[in-house]
Image (cartoon, rainbow, N blue to C red):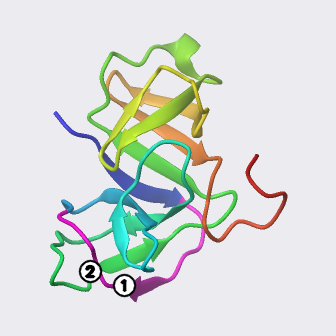
Amino acid sequence: MPCTFELKKGQSECIRIPAAGTMAANTLCQYDEAGEVVAAATNKDVVGIVLEAATSATEPLVQLLNSGDIIEAKGVTPTIVASTVGDTVDIATGNDITFTDTNKDALVVRRISADTCWLTLKFLARAVGAAKA
């Protein structure tokens, strides 16, 4: 079952951005080399959350994410336990995270339930700070 993502804490704006692929609503997205959004992958700068289903011929509404924003991931597997808080995760696809922390794309900051947690993202397209190594 894929994850869905939702902004829980932070201030964000929403804009329409051309899509270069098929994405479900509530998917994390990144820019491709043409400046269009595609489903996010590990070790990439996340632009935001696609709020509506998209295909290559659409301009979906994207909620832009900023440094310090907290997003909720629902439908996470395996089970999230109390000791998961403080662990890092990787983005497996735009709608999935994995607890293999090769690239440490996000930090688990709160356990909500066995399949839901809050995250802060490490790599953001709009973040201020040092460049990604």
- In the image, is residue 52 above or below residue 96? below
Q: Front-most of 126 and 14? A: 126
Residue at horizontal 41%, vertical 19%?
A: 80
Q: Quadrant of residue 30?
A: bottom left
Give the left or right position of residue 109, taking residue 133 as reference.
left
Q: Is residue 37 above or below residue 45?
A: below
Disc 2 + disc 1, Cβ < 8 Å? yes
Residues packed near mark 1 inside 10 Å, few (<14), some (14 to 19) or many (20 plus): some
Determine which of the numbered discs, if any, sits on residue 109 in the image. Answer: none
Quarter occupied by residue 2: top left
Q: Which residues are magenta?
A: 9-22
Identify the amino acid type marked 1.
Ile
Quarter of the N terminus within the rendering: top left
Where is residue 20? Give x, y as percent: 27, 73
Q: Is residue 18 magenta?
A: yes
Q: SS for tag 1? A: loop
Residue drawn at (28%, 77%), measured in percent from left and top?
19
Position of residue 24 measured from the top left corner of the image (x, y, whole percent): 18, 59
Residue found at the very far front of the displayed protein: 33
Task: State which quadrant residue 124 falls in.
Answer: bottom right
Residue under label 2, please give it: 60
**Does label 2 or label 1 sit earlier along the sequence?**
1
Residue 31's place in the image compared with 67, above or below, is: below
The secondary structure that dominates the magenta segment is: loop
Amino acid type, mark 2: Pro
The circle on residue 17 is 1
Element at badge 2? Answer: loop
